[in-house]
Image (spheres, rainbow, N blue to C red):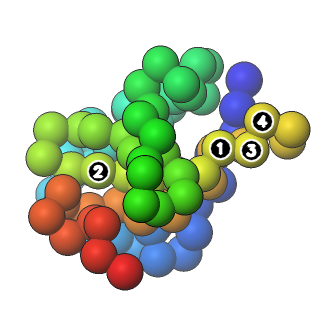
Amino acid sequence: MYNLIFEKSALESLNKLEPQIKERIWNKLQQCKENPFRFLEHLEEIDGFKLRVGDYRAIVDVDNSTKTIKVLKVGHRKNVYER
């Protein structure tokens, strides 16, 4: 099983969302802990993977050697890919 690690900015972004959306994203991240590549899609332009939850995205980095999933960004799909 993988461990979840949040960057401070990603956790702040997640906490700003509406409670229902926050819960959906949290539940999907918990499912990713079992088998992350079932839900994640590789990104071409940015190093990492995206997790789709409705109109929201979580940008994550997976480290197989330490079995960690690092959440880099969380937000609406129109804003999350901006640098």
Residue under label 3, please give it.
63
In the rendered structure, which amino acid carries the disc numbered 1? Val
Q: Residue at x 58, y 19 (%)?
A: 35
Q: Within 10 Å of the Cα at label 4, are there few (<14), some (14-19), or many (20+) other Cα atoms? A: few
Q: Is residue 40 above or below residue 6?
A: above
Q: Quadrant of residue 76?
A: bottom left
User: In the displayed structure, does residue 64 sit left or right of residue 12?
Assistant: right
Q: Nearer the viewer, residue 54 or 22?
A: 54
Q: Secondary structure at mark 3?
A: strand
Direction from residue 77 to residue 38 in the image, left or right: right
What residue did someone put label 2 on? 57
10 Å crowding of disc 1: few (<14), some (14-19), many (20+): some
Tag 4's secondary structure? loop
Q: Position of residue 82 (x, y in %)?
A: 29, 76
Sequence-first disc among 2 and 3: 2
Quick check: marks 3 and 4 in contact, CB under 8 Å? Answer: yes
Which x, y percent locates residue 36?
Answer: 56, 27
Confirm whether residue 14 shows in the render.
no
